[in-house]
Amino acid sequence: MMQTIRFLTVALTVLGAWVALSAPVSAQDLCARDGRDQLVCLDRPAQRIVSLSPGATELLFSAGAGDRVIAVSAWSDYPPQAAELPQVGDSNRLDLETIMAMRPDLVVAWVDGNSRQQLDRLMELGIRVFWLAPREFADIAWAIADLALFAGTRDVGALRAARFRDGVEALQGRYADAEPVRVFYQVWNQPLMTVNRQELIGKAIELCGGQNVFADQSRLVPRVSREAVLDAAPEVILTAGRGDNDRSWLDEWRQFPGLPAIAADNLYLEPPDLLARPTERMLDGISHLCQTLEQARARL
């Protein structure tokens, strides 16, 4: 009798799971709030998606929606198959006529990179636009999950999002008690630009035990003077450069031997795309950054 009850219990559990997975997705299930706090809903999973930033392109592929992406923006070079897709413009200007002709059922945009005026025009023409604006590491995981929801690939998205969250938490635990080290992160050369603590690279520096010498700046990516950097006396200088393994930006600081970073030879070139794009690969970028700062500590 007990074996029969157990069999029926298992059978009902499996049947319930099968029904849940095979049930049609309702429009109410395909809704999420985007980076502009707008509720975006689809009638059915998206089959034709246009990505308007390299970061959005990466996140769509992470979400398992790569085969539904029909066009991308300039500089969408990862994963490699993204570079083979048609391009519909860049952060300065989009080809709205081409986008409309492609009849997308979802356009994914970037709050800090795309023109709101142009995208508002698309929305007026009936195109659904989902804006991304990752400000926290958790936002990257949420973006993957939301895009997977819209593409009907929730299982893939949930797995990749969880892997990203778990990886960040593991790094946070590993470097929670790391010895502080003063860091200057150079975003650009002329004008000289860096990041504050609210920018994701700034958050990565702090996660790894670094003290961003310009953490308290009001702008996410502020301009600073060379004199301000010298006064801040960083023990480590980091940059991703122009993305071509060019160390000239770092070598320019060698004319100031009084800087602690120069005295310790703590000048490092970080992999450009891993930290610059708030995508799943940022986990690798944070891990690399933490290892860099460990090396820097050993030199002080």
Image (cartoon, rainbow, N blue to C red):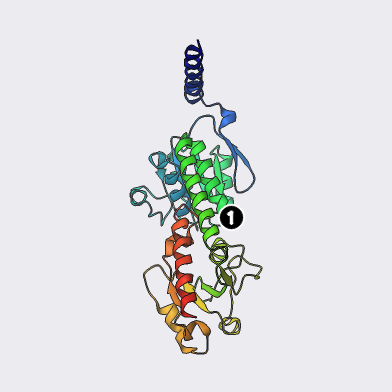
- At which x and y percent is residue 254? 45, 86
Task: Please name the residue shown 42% across and 49% down the image.
Answer: 72
- At which x and y percent is residue 225? 58, 80
Q: Dot 1, how many residues are within 10 Å of its Cα: few (below 14), some (14-19), or many (20+)?
A: some
Left or right: 112 as drawn, with respect to 247: right
- At which x and y percent is residue 191? 53, 76
Residue 53 in sight here: no
- Of all residues shown, which one is farthest toward the front? 2
Residue placed most toward the observer, 197 or 99: 197
Residue 87 in sight here: yes
- At which x and y percent is residue 180? 57, 72
Task: Please name the residue shown 48% across and 86% down the image.
Answer: 263
**Number of numbered labels in the structure image:** 1
Above or below, 225 relative to 165 = below
Name the residue tied to disc 1. Answer: 136
Q: Amino acid at mark 1?
A: Glu
Above or below, 175 relative to 169 = below
Left or right: 213 as drawn, with respect to 81: right
At numbered mark 1, what does the secondary structure look like: helix, strand or loop? loop
- Of all residues shown, which one is farthest toward the top? 1
Task: Please name the residue shown 44% across and 74% down the image.
Answer: 268
